[in-house]
Image (tube, rainbow, N blue to C red):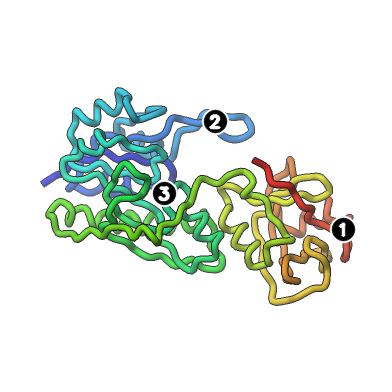
Amino acid sequence: MTHTVVLMGTPQFAVPILEALVADDNYDVLAVVTQPDRPQGRKHILTPSPVKVAALAHKLPVLQPEKIAGSSEMAQIINWQPDFIITAAFGQFLPTKLLAAAQIAAVNTHASLLPKYRGGAPVHYAIMNGDNETGVSIMYMVKEMDAGDVIDVVKVPITSTDNVGTMFDKLSFAGRDLLLATLPKIAAGNISPVKQAIDDVTFSPNIPHDKQNLNFEVETAKQLDWHVRGLYPTHPAYVQVAGQRIKITQVQPLDETTTQPAGYVVEKNKKELKIAAANHTVLRVLRLQPAGKSEMPIQAYLNGAGKAYVVGQPWAEKIKNER
């Protein structure tokens, strides 16, 4: 039996799921719902979401409501009465009336081990908090954000070199496989959903601008490494150096200590820049992006603007929180 599906998703995370549903004869994707095209880059070029690009490649109908609630697109989906409504990082709340249109189930593919990290940036916070693992949860959708009963989960390790980009790649395929294994069980009623433990709920709100600031006086080298990897490449972390903002894209915490004040240069040569962090720890900067320039390895920076810095000199300036 072929089940009809409406898939709702926006970033690359949802693309493997769409591709798998299209390739599987057990499913008929009626339409894809995604966020409207948004301006991107310095030239603010209107750009479609990765899910829209994939959907158009398969000649699927694409719906892009600015707000799904009360829209003509919502009315169309309700009229279709699809067997499944599936979301994967769609980016909008779905009204109860829309969820009820699913004849079998409305389910969400969420990139965390619920009830941990409900919200829009679960992968970011898992890495920034130094977690050793995260995963994907398949859950029933309810009106409250990521609060539905959990149908199944898969765990995925976070390595010391993973960042948001690499983890999203891993989780997108893990989520695809879990969803495709779970949908037939849902259709057959062969599942035992688990209610989320309220006391264990944590949240991962969208990344605010001031979360990108690196604070060498407060964060140890290891915490700065988590912070950088937990924001790259979607919201690169930054420091202020000589009044100029520099994005920090790759670092390495070292098994060293220093007596230099936090934010000061510990060691510098043509190939290496080490900066003091909190608790006398030491951070090696590997890649960065000065204002108005492309991302570069530390060697290129040290051959240019970085030449001016010497051991014992302040490098990372304290930045006041920006709201």
Disc 1 packing (10 Å; few <14; some 14–19; many ≥20)? some
- Mark 3 or mark 1, earlier in chain: 3
Q: 240 or 301: which is nearer to us?
A: 240
* 199 lies left or right of 210: left
Q: Quadrant of residue 273?
A: bottom right
Q: Say which residue appears at 24% left-offset and 26% top-offset.
A: 76
Whether label 3 touches label 2, CB < 8 Å: no
Q: Quadrant of the C terminus?
A: top right
Where is 76 relative to 303, above or below?
above
Where is 252 relative to 210, above or below?
below
Q: CA distance from mark 3 to mark 1?
A: 41 Å
Q: Secondary structure at mark 1?
A: loop
Q: Say which residue appears at 25% left-offset and 54% top-offset.
A: 180
* 70 lies left or right of 259: left
Type of amino acid at the residue the image marks with label 1: Tyr
Residue 121: horizontal and vertical position, in percent?
48, 50
Q: Which residue is mark 3?
A: 13
* 197 lies left or right of 308: left
Q: Secondary structure at mark 3?
A: helix
Q: Which residue is mark 2?
A: 39
Q: Secondary structure at mark 2?
A: strand
Type of amino acid at the residue the image marks with label 3: Phe
Q: 227 or 64: which is nearer to us?
A: 227
Q: Which residue is mark 1?
A: 309
Q: Which mark is residue 80?
A: none
Extreme residue in the left direction:
1
Extreme residue in the front direction:
199
Q: Is residue 138 visible?
A: yes
- Mark 3 or mark 2, earlier in chain: 3
Q: Say which residue appears at 75% left-offset and 75% top-offset.
A: 257
Q: CA distance from mark 2 to mark 1?
A: 38 Å
